Amino acid sequence: MNKEIANYIRRHETKILEDWMHEMQKKVDERSFSVISDQVFLNTSKEFMELVFSNLLDTEEEYNGKIGDFAANIVRLGWPLSFLSRGIRTFRTILFKEMTSESKYNVEQIKKLVLDFENWLSPMQDKMVETYSDTWEKTINLQKIALQELSAPLIPVFEKISIMPLVGTIDTERARLIMENLLTGVVRHRSEVVLIDITGVPVVDTMVAHHIIQAADAVRLVGAKCMIVGIRPEIAQTIVNLGIDLNHITTTSTLQKGMGEALRFTNREIVSVEGLD
């Protein structure tokens, strides 16, 4: 960084920060910043201000580490990439305007100042955007893995009886995960009956029904009985209209009824015991 620029920032750091925060607050996306406290915004702004000229004092490794930490913090707060790019543009405008208004620069000096700004801030912006994008991609991938792990769990509820509650839409990728979790879980829990609860599946079309039937067939191949529960009237009508054959699969309208069938299949039942509170 140009020493003249660095010294100017050091001398006017407080005013530059105030002007920068004022301009940024006028431009921010209310949906992204409405839940952020003023103190968090102030602390993040100070961190940004320290970062924009830390490459003067830090080694490249230290500087890259700070950019990575700052980008990760922005992603964690849920602030958009535009915060970084707009923040640097706003900082550049404020600093250039204040420097040129305080000192008398001739044309050549202004050209040199513009070039110094470009050489200093453009690589920083590129690095920030690259780091932010990498951090965001890693975060999304981790969230996707976590959601996949939770999206099709096989839950043992009684000895030999397990339930897989399905919520939301079912696409090809999720159907593959359902199949894997079913087969792995049946073996791990030694299940004899598996109930696939589709109460939370909003739409059952030909593709969804095909995936569910495939899953049921796969469960039978490993020696367990598969039942589909949560067949709502509109889903039953859809299945009939589509001509889908579920005759070889036990179905019930509710999970409660399905659990009763599963208990009977394993020679058990729920009974009321008199004399107990």
Image (cartoon, grey):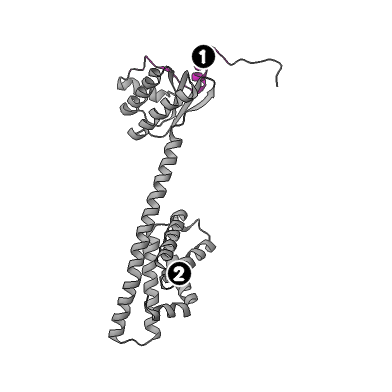
In the rendered image, the vertical position of residue 2 relative to residue 227, given as above or below: below
Across and down, in percent, residue 271 comes to 61, 15
Q: Earlier in the sequence, mark 2 or mark 1?
A: 2
Across and down, in percent, residue 113 comes to 33, 79
- Please name whichever residue, 213 or 65, is drawn nearer the observer in this view of the structure: 65
Residue 225 shown in magenta: no
Q: Residue at x 51, y 66 (%)?
A: 42
In the rendered image, the vertical position of residue 232 relative to residue 104, given as above or below: above
Q: Please, what secondary structure does the residue beneath circle 2 have?
A: helix
Q: Residue at x 70, y 19 (%)?
A: 276
Q: Which residues are magenta?
A: 245-269
Q: Which numbered marker is on residue 49? A: 2
Residue farthest along the top direction in this orientation = 267
Q: Which numbered marker is on residue 266? A: 1
Q: Which numbered marker is on residue 178? A: none
Across and down, in percent, residue 25 comes to 45, 65
In this figure, what is the number of numbered marks? 2
Q: Residue at x 66, y 15 (%)?
A: 273
Q: Please, what secondary structure does the residue beneath circle 1 have?
A: loop
